[in-house]
Image: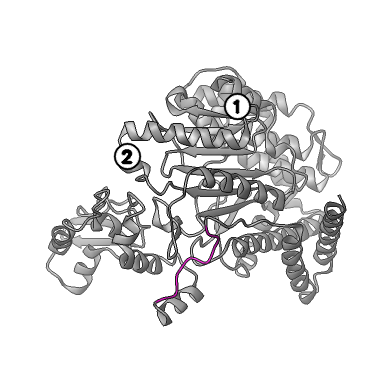
Amino acid sequence: MKDPVELANVFLEHNPWQLKSNPVWTTTIFQCKRNIARSNFPAKLSSEEMSRLFLLLEQSVIKFFGNERCQVIAAEKLSPIDKEFFCEHFLCREGFQNAGVGQGIAVDFQGRFFAQLNIQDHLFLQWIDVADSWDDTWNELARCEESIGKELAFAFSAEFGFLTANPRECGTALNVSAYLHIPALRYSNHLESVLKTLEEVEITGLDGSKSDFLADYMILKNAYSLGVSEQEILRSVHLSATKIVGEEKRTRAEIQKEGSGEMKDRISRAYGLLTHSYQLSTKEALSSLSLIKLGIDLGWLGGLSDQAINHLFLLVRRAHLLKTLGQKDEESPQVQHHRAAFLHQRLKSLQLKEDLA
Amino acid sequence: MADRPEECAGQCRRPVAVIYKEIVGDLVTCIEMCSECPVLQAKLYGNTSLTLGKQIVGKEAGVCCGRCGTTLLSVRTGGIVGCPECYNVFNDILIQELIAERKIPNRMKKMKENTKKQVLHTGKTPDKTVELSSTSQIVSLNEALKEALKKENYEQAAWLRDQIKALTEKGHHEGSS
């Protein structure tokens, strides 16, 4: 058993984003929610009932994975910064900062599986596609869900499918999110015409905004979980993501061919900001790293790989940064200064190539 | 950012659809409302002031799930439900809400309107497993390939062909091992 600090150190060393070889389609997250039929949903449980249920959920998760692959951590053992760290690391959009007795999380040591226990729903299972293996990742989620379902009968109705605390998530209770890095489409103003061709998917930015794509990342996810089958969800997200990847690649090729001065300027400025700032906010750091990632793919920057930049996308976020530097919770200006100093160090080997010099 | 109407504050979790600005003399009030907001209906269609919201609160306060105590008002204002039984108790209302919030595809909405017996869920059941093979990805890549060729986007088509080839080889490899 590792304590949360040891676990965080494991995840700081390697994360799934480092393994992806596609510079546009960075990762896919498969999530499903399940509740136990004979129990009320967590919001309507007493702390005693919640604790009893937590033990059952823990046993079922560990039975599937085995102690050597996975660990369940009770929420009361996690400090606020630990919670923030796991939230950042597993790209959770629904946080669990207020989680307490009878609630917790489960993680596998490879950083691919993450679960929330007794938060909004009894089980929130999540798998991250780490090696462009869409079908394998889905199958792992399906096997995990099936195994736990054999132990604990899930709440299900013929009309609404798998029942969730939020009725808008019932049915398949499945959420498939493709993380796409689309700076070329954004800056060339081609994005809107591409989005018009997509069906049955929703688009948001990293922070949940529907119009502002922080760090040029678009999260493309299924628009419906009820009234569609799992296969239809997987098909529509895969097809839409493939279309966007194709368009982004085409636009990048055009920018490269034209040698766009405007884009070279953006990338050079991002390089300057990251390597010479005294303080950097998360937003500034992520937006600039996005342009560095593009510059590497276009061959205008060298000395660092796309995967190394993917890793930095996580490491510059507040809790990751504090954990990496071994610092406790600090005020914003200090964190911003640490971030700038950390990036100077990590980007030392980054070089402007002839095209940008 | 504007506030929600007093009646809904802390209860309504539906997305904001309307920002209502009212100017009376020097007093400017700005309220954010969801598309179903009873306060909005009252303002638009002349029901007296804000009492409509209060009437609804009063009328519906007694309707609740016998197992967990979730109220109809909470369901109507986009809140979470408390237990599996809520789906039986509030069946019709939940269907109305999901349709109003466009949480069901149009084709399913039409089928439901035509045949009341049509169930909304079309996905897996607890005793069924949905396994995927690389074939499903190949199908969607082929679809994207057709579209790329139609648009004469040959570079994208070539990239898609490479993807299909890699997945086909992976499929053969898995089949033979």
In the displayed image of the protein, which residue is found farthest to the bottom?
B114
- Looking at the rendering, which quadrant does residue B146 occupy? bottom right
Q: Is the residue at mark 1 from the same chain as the one at mark 2?
A: yes
Q: Which one is in front, A101 or A11?
A: A101
Q: Which residues are magenta?
A: B117-125
Give the secondary structure at mark 2.
Answer: loop
User: Which quadrant: the N terminus of chain A?
Assistant: top right
- Looking at the rendering, which quadrant does residue A326 occupy? top right
Give the chain letter at badge 1: A
- Looking at the rendering, which quadrant does residue A347 occupy? top right
Residue density around tag 2, few if under 14, some if 14–19, many if 20 or more, within 10 Å: some
Percent x, y for residue A154?
A: 46, 50
Amino acid type at circle 1 is Arg
Amino acid type at circle 2 is Leu
- Residue at (74%, 34%) from the top-left corner? A308
Residue density around tag 1, few if under 14, some if 14–19, many if 20 or more, within 10 Å: many
| Disc on res. A339 | 1
Q: Earlier in the sequence, mark 1 or mark 2?
A: 2
- Residue at (67%, 50%) from the top-left corner? A139
Give the secondary structure at mark 1.
Answer: helix
Percent x, y for residue A156?
A: 44, 56
Q: Which one is in front, A107 or A256?
A: A107
| Residue A98 is at least partly visible in this image | no
| Disc on res. A45 | 2
- Residue at (84%, 39%) from the top-left corner? A353
Say left or right for A208 vs A178. Answer: left
